[in-house]
Amino acid sequence: MAGTVLAVLEQRDGGFRKTAYEVATAAADIASQLGGEAVALVIGKELPQNAEQIGKYGIKKIYFAKSEGLSGYVPEVFTEAVLKAIEQVQPQAVFFSASLQGKDLAPRVAARLGVGLATDCTELTVTDGELWAVRPVYAGKAFVTVRFKGTPNLASLRPNVFTPREAGNDTA
């Protein structure tokens, strides 16, 4: 769906990781600019105990890929779950955390889809309906602004850069 942003949210010990709120906030911001909505994918054995709270951060719907054997990260299974969610949702963009898990999962998904991936993004903007990202290069000594080719636009977001905030709340 045009303008839809899929946020891949990580969980640990029965709750969302802090980066999940950061990714959800960024997804909601960009979806709003694209005229769409932010939706989330959660993969695991069970939904986090606080799953309903993610809606406060602008997520309109949660897709849940459940498996009893998924108490931890299983690369092949997680990749397939993300690909199936992308097929179902048809998002314009997919955001991951640039955590250890996200740094492993996002490139796998990009390779399977045959699209590019902007890694470790520190800023996202929309100009004329297109998503642009700022990311570090040269060991962080410089930053480059990139435009995405192909759909969906895949990006991993640097942790502790996108401040989580509840939807409709412009203050951090």
Image: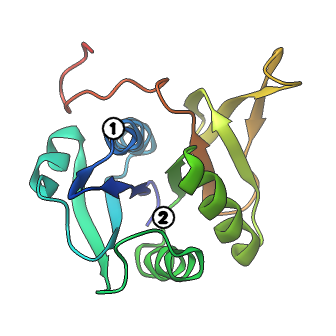
Instruction: Identify which residue is drawn at 72% across, 53% down.
Output: 117
Q: Is residue 151 left or right of residue 149?
A: left
Q: Amino acid at mark 2?
A: Pro
Q: Position of residue 155 (x, y in %)?
A: 61, 48
Q: Position of residue 72 (x, y in %)?
A: 41, 69
Instruction: Identify which residue is drawn at 64% across, 52% down.
Output: 103
Viewer-side label of 2, 1: 1
Q: Is residue 7 left or right of residue 18?
A: right
Instruction: Identify which residue is drawn at 73% across, 61% down.
Output: 150
What residue does disc 2 label?
91
Q: Classify mark 2: helix, strand or loop.
A: loop
What residue does disc 1 label?
18
- Disc 1 crowd rating (10 Å Cα; few below 14, some 14-19, many 20+) is some
> Residue 138, which numbered label?
none
- Disc 2 crowd rating (10 Å Cα; few below 14, some 14-19, many 20+) is many
**Labels in figure, total:** 2
In the orientation shown, which residue stands out farthest toward the right? 138
Residue 103, placed above or below residue 127:
below
Q: Amino acid at mark 1?
A: Lys
Mark 2 and mark 1 lie on one chain; the one further toward the N terminus is 1
Q: Classify mark 1: helix, strand or loop.
A: helix
Q: Label 2, label 1: how many angstroms apart (C-alpha)?
A: 23 Å
Q: Are marks 2 and 1 in contact (CB under 8 Å)?
A: no
Instruction: Identify which residue is drawn at 25% across, 27% down.
Output: 165
The one nearer the camera, 47 or 82, is 47
Query: Looking at the rendering, in which quadrant would you find the N terminus?
Result: bottom left
Q: Position of residue 109 (x, y in %)?
A: 64, 69
Looking at the rendering, which quadrant does residue 113 occupy?
bottom right
Looking at the rendering, which quadrant does residue 170 occupy?
top left
Q: Position of residue 32 (x, y in %)?
A: 36, 40
